[in-house]
Image: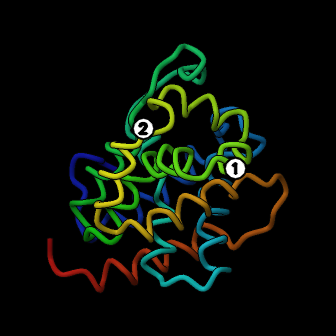
Amino acid sequence: MDKNHLDRETIVDYLGDIFMRRGTESYLGEAVTMSQHMLQTAYNAEKAGQSKTVIVAALLHDIGHYTGEFPDDYIQQGVDNRHEHTGAAILEKFFGPEIVEPVRLHVDAKRYLCAIEPEYFDGLSDASVQTLALQGGPFNREQAAEFEKKPHLETTIRIRKFDDNGKTPGLNTPGVDYYLAMVQAVLDEQPWR
């Protein structure tokens, strides 16, 4: 599949291809694969009764990890791949801000929650603590206040928490095809972009 010629007709198949080809890769030192993590995040959103749009944003929140080729140990080398921005840049060609902005802001949401909820940091996995340091650490008071002005804040915070809980080894979730049908349904509802 040619990533340079993606359109509304091919994006869902392309996303499926990414899950099939690369989904078994390790997820940044966690005990789950990338695919398991993304599916669990979507599953957590669905279990919580969220809309299709939120579930799709939850599924695709880490798609930016696939937009560049980094060695498996890039985090240990002190590199932040800024996956939230690259993922959002790809998705905004196909989806509206209700999906794109939570993807773009989910890393900042971790930084925000660490700043305003001291107990939040204690619940982060070791790998998430390590990436937090690469991503700039917890927000200071001014950064947190500025973040609170962002659109789609509540959805972004919910997705962040679904993300944090999407790291359970052996958890059974619906498969990628189940969620890709939801992606297609949401895409079909989008105005032509």
Check disc 1 and report the residue beneath it.
119
Q: Residue at x 29, y 86 (%)?
A: 189
Q: Residue furthest top?
A: 77
Q: Residue 47 in the image: state x and y as whole percent.
A: 68, 80
User: Residue 50 shows which numbered tag?
Assistant: none
Total labels drawn: 2
User: Residue 140 shows which numbered tag?
Assistant: 2
Q: Residue at x 72, y 33 (%)?
A: 126
Q: Residue 82 in the image: state x and y as whole percent.
A: 39, 35
Horizontal arrangement in the rendering, residue 118 relative to residue 123 (left or right)? left
Image quarter (top left, top right, bottom left or bottom right) of the C terminus: bottom left
- The quarter holding residue 48 reads bottom right
Q: Is the residue marked by circle 1 packed among few (<14), some (14-19), or many (20+) residues within 10 Å?
A: few
Q: Which residue is at the front of the view, 5 or 172?
A: 172
Q: Residue furthest left?
A: 193
Q: Residue 14 in the image: state x and y as whole percent.
A: 40, 57
Regarding mark 1 in the picture, which secondary structure is present there?
helix
- The quarter holding residue 80 reads top left
Q: Residue furthest right?
A: 170
Horizontal arrangement in the rendering, residue 60 relative to residue 120 (left or right)? left
